[in-house]
Amino acid sequence: MTRLKQAALDIDTPAAIGIDQLDWAMVERDLDSSGCAVLTQLLSSEDCRALAALYPDDRHFRSRVIMARHGFGRGEYKYFSYPLPDPIAQLRPRLYSHLVAIANRWNATMGIDIQFPAEHDDFLARCHEAGQTRPTPLLLQYVEGDYNCLHQDLYGEHVFPLQVAILLSEPGRDFEGGEFVLTEQRPRMQSRAEVVPLRQGDAVVFAVHNRPVQGTRGSYRVNMRHGVSRLRSGRRHTLGVIFHDAK
């Protein structure tokens, strides 16, 4: 079913075309060295405004989550329903096609006996056979005082080890604060935090759960979490692109 829905999109958006023109060798180096990489201006300001404007229209979404009710922080988000809006339906498999080789290499390096198929539709079929049938791309909304606690988006047995967040609002104009934050916990060491500066339309690719790090005695796993610092003013929208579906 997912394959048919995505195959129907026979006209690529400029953003989807632009993905192929990125410096993916640099993206891979950044992911290997720090667990994240910035894709500058992945979406135009017009695309960002159009996606953020979907938030009030519940016809596009399967559920709404109020973070404070679950101890996730403050703010809210909505999961898209299938079929996904065209830009997201195109971005998701195109991004996956460039990230899958990195994901497979990471798993092999960490001794995880799971390899991912080249096509995103085939990976979704694996998720759906395991009961993970609910779409996971989401739109997040923060207002003054909101924040997102450090967490991992796992959702089930089948987890793709990389995901993407795209900032749809402009810092300094639409909001203040609300920085994207990553933490890394290495064995027997204190956690390392990294703040990732983003502008409107920029995307950050980052590790969902674990990533390999080269040490003096070989590779080992580090544990990654991500979140958003407190919004000091304004309103912030973010598009989250997660490649595995949820139970």
Image (cartoon, rainbow, N blue to C red):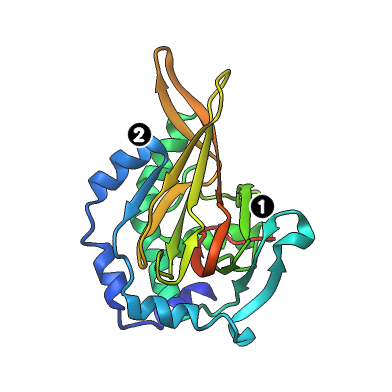
Q: Compared with residue 137, is residue 83 higher up or lower down, i.e. above or below?
A: below
Q: Is residue 151 above or below residue 238?
A: above
Q: Which mark is residue 156?
A: 1
Query: Nearest the camera: 70 or 109?
Result: 70
Label of residue 37 in the image: none
Between label 2 and label 1, give the one nearer the viewer: 2
* Horizontal side, residue 53 vs residue 247: left or right: left
Q: CB of mark 2 within 8 Å of CB of mark 1?
A: no
Q: Nearer the viewer, residue 75 or 23?
A: 75
Residue at the far top: name it.
217
Q: Secondary structure at mark 2?
A: helix
Amino acid at pointer 2: Ser
Residue drawn at (53%, 38%) of the image: 183
Give the residue at mark 2: 33
Q: Position of residue 174 (x, y in %)?
A: 45, 72
In space, the residues marked 2 and 1 are separated at their CA atoms by 27 Å
Mark 2 Cα-neighbour bin, 10 Å: few <14, some 14–19, many ≥20: some
Coordinates of residue 138 in the picture (x, y in percent): 56, 68
Q: How many marks?
A: 2
Q: Residue 59 at what x, y percent from top left?
A: 62, 87
Which residue is rendered at x = 49% and y = 66% of the image? 238
At label 1, the amino acid type is: Gly
Could you say which quadrant of the image residue 132 lies in? bottom right
Please indicate whether residue 165 sits to the left or right of residue 44 in the image: right
User: Which type of secondary structure does the marked residue at label 1 adopt?
Assistant: loop
- Is residue 26 at all visible to an observer of this figure? yes
Q: Does residue 86 show up?
A: no
Q: Say which quadrant the N terminus sits in.
A: bottom right
Q: Earlier in the sequence, mark 2 or mark 1?
A: 2
Badge 1 local density, few (<14 within 10 Å), some, or many (20+)? some
